[in-house]
Amino acid sequence: MGKRKAIRRVALAAAVALGASACLSSNSGSSGGSGSGSKSGDGNVEVVFGFGGSQSAGFRAAFTDWEKTSGIKIKFTEASQSFDTLIRTRVAANNVPDIALFPQPGILKDFVAQGKMTDLSTQLDVNKLQSDLIPGVLDAGKVGDKFYGVPVSYNVKSLVFYPKKAWQAAGYKIPQTQAELTALTNQIKSQGKTPWCLGIAAGSATGWPATDWLEDYMLRTAGPQKYDDWVSHKIPFNDPTVKTAAQAFENLVLSNGNVLGGRKGAVSTNFATAGNPMFNSTPSCWMLKQGNFITQKGFFPDKIVANLDSEVGVFYFPGESASDRPVLGGGDLAAVFNGKDDDTKKVMAFMTGPDFPGWNENAGFLSPRKDWDLNKYQTQVTKQIAVIGKNASVFRFDGSDQMPGAVGSGSFWKGMTAWISGQQSLDQALQSIEQSWPS
Amino acid sequence: MIKVLNTLIAVVAGVGGALVVYWLLNFIAERLPGKWEDRVKPYLYLLPALAAIGIFLIYPVVQTVIYSFANQTSTQWVGFKNYTDLFQQKDFQITLVNTLLWILVVPVMVVILGLGVATLADRLRSRGERTAKTLIFLPMAVSGVALAAIWGFVYEVRPAGEPQVGILNGVVTALGHDPVAWLQESTFKLNTFMLMVVLIWAQVGFSMVLLSAAIKGVPDDTLEAARIDGANEAQVFFRVVVPQIWSTVITVFVTTVINVMKVFDVVYVMTGGNFNTNVIAVRFFNELITNGNAGRAAAIVVVLVIAVIPLMIYQVRHFRAEEAAR
């Protein structure tokens, strides 16, 4: 028995010793410097990105010729299902890539706050970019007065898709204002049809399509200034203006008979296929508000995608008046971890420059550059969307993507889901999101 | 080809490396004078295993406890703030209640159903018994995510008027009712119970196999003696069979409880913790990956560890008592 006690003591002592040796790491994470990324000037640059499928293929192909002329070898790391997980794990392990394309500025800003990112003015001619890019898109990667992320692609979310043939047969007209949109909704409903398609289910990201709706209404009912205040938390998340915006969404879409399947149906319908009932022989719903990615292969039925221009119509999700044209969008922000590598600078310059051939064959992505030739887009629908983006009175980056991760890809999604599904009232949902905002 | 080669090298190097380590340890022990060789040798042989446990189990646990008192990037102490924050959140309270419900319901159901199936299968002829057991054991071989995806189809809901894919709503609409969004029905925790069904379905096979083996180990003469004394079948089962297999029942129960405390995939895939169905492991994942809050994530794990410890102690004691009785 005495022996056993002795062993226990030894074990305890070992545990204590281990405990004592384990203390907090004194923030030794090298801030984008030594030990991170590939070595300087070795001709290798690692790029991590979060898109997959044809976008990924197009993006890789864009570098093929350039790699030969520049002598720089790109290592592509695709994390299409788990960008957040991958990048957070690698940053925590201090095993960062050279460049990451962040789909959500929120996470980028988390890393900026931790001192992991490089000020892009040391890498690129930021002033020139500011005049080269569509106004407003560059602001998404701005922290304080420094730029940490520059969009290499952008997308438009203030869009409504409709079944072109059935729509023309029914004689509906494109609404130019919110009032006209409401009138159209009521007209469709009065004919015994369901006006809106909506699906917010997206696995662990369930709820995000609803955040786009709320953001688009914030831009319209509260205006861009309030929108910015809301996104940067200068006003609380549950500010009365937010409630007004949410109610506008509720009145148009969520009220009885306006959406296919009702509120619970919307919550359990996957966003990717939510628009497909529009293409039934008689449409089960008539309008789908969604970002331009939805026109890619794999979302609408294949035979619709194959004849996109004749089957699918798109219009701008209107503002309060015909001249008020705010556009909500997103994009992939290229950001640099290792700022001391000249190869990385070259890759950044190429990706953001006029010669980058990345996006012409992909309906899912638009070029953020003003000098991009619209005729390079392969469908009328994409061209139309690009024009909507260009004609924006103001462009704002997706708000939930800019908020801290805990809100933007956490409580905001969950709150909208709980509200639409009926677990929480609107006030409760907005309040719980407000409480989750990291101090 | 390269993969095969790599595997071969790994196996040879791994086994060879282990041999070399033990040979070295043995060599050291043999250098020691007389009695010391025998005294020290066992501990030297245990050393690699202890080191592995120390590095991969004890050290991370200690470090996690330490991080749970630090901020989200583990750079500053915050005292008990992570814990107080957590327990004040309504969301986390619901999560705890759900986890508790899982712990209360699932292991009991798994034991009862496993026992029932094992007893009934025991009455079948050997062929029927084998078939029945194989079928019931099959779900054990399915990974958690696949399991959740399969049951996702069972609970699938489509808007009224569209063809229903899910079998439950197929039945409901065939009877003339509107389709029900099962996983969103949080009244009386219906959706949480529907998620539990998935795990129970997967775990009953395991429970059945162990309990069936135990039932077969019950000596026939005890059953005969009871029957001769006039006991009916229910009495035979509850008073003769069950007491004799009780230790297996406990083992199954405790193992299932520990599995249930860690339940993640079913909830993560089917509801993502929405609709008031969140459990502690999903919450931990969200806190660490979505929110990037290492401190709070660590605090959640510590809560989980503290909750598991009494069970572990109970199981170890139970196991020791068993050993002693043998």
Image (cartoon, grey):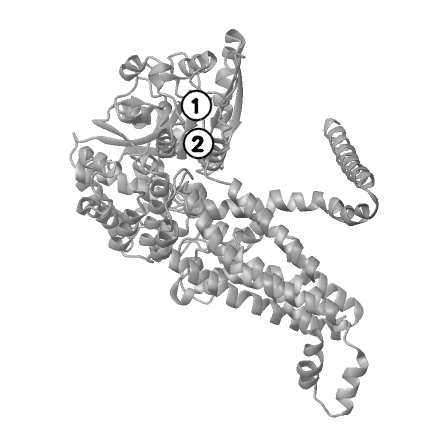
**Residue at image point 80% right, 69% down:** B126
The picture places residue B272, in percent across and down from the top left corner, at: 45, 50
**Residue at image point 33% right, 33% down:** A313
State which quadrant residue B44 falls in.
Answer: top right
Residue situated furthest bottom in the rendering: B230
Discs 1 and 2 share one subunit: yes
Residue that label 2 marks: A296
Mark closer to the observer (1, 2):
1
Secondary structure at badge 2 equals: loop
The picture places residue A187, in percent across and down from the top left corner, at: 23, 47
Task: Report the chain holding disc 2.
Answer: A
**Residue at image point 38% right, 65% down:** B187
Q: Marks 1 and 2: CB-CB under 8 Å?
A: no
Q: Amino acid at mark 2?
A: Gln
How crowded is the residue under tag 2: few (<14 C-alpha within 10 Å), some, or many (20+)? Answer: some
State which quadrant residue A360 falls in.
Answer: top left
Q: Amino acid at mark 1?
A: Gly
Q: Is residue B89 visible?
A: yes
Q: Is residue B61 left or right of residue B1?
A: left
Residue that label 1 marks: A32
Task: Report the chain holding disc 1.
Answer: A
**Residue at image point 28% right, 17% down:** A130
CA gap, disc 1 and disc 2: 36 Å
Closest to the observer: A115 or A131? A115
Q: Quadrant of the N terminus of chain A?
A: bottom right
Residue situated furthest top in the rendering: A69
The picture places residue A186, in percent across and down from the top left corner, at: 22, 48
Q: Is residue A25 left or right of residue A181?
A: right
Q: Earlier in the sequence, mark 1 or mark 2?
A: 1
Does A33 sit above or below residue A315? above
The picture places residue A59, in percent across and down from the top left corner, at: 47, 22
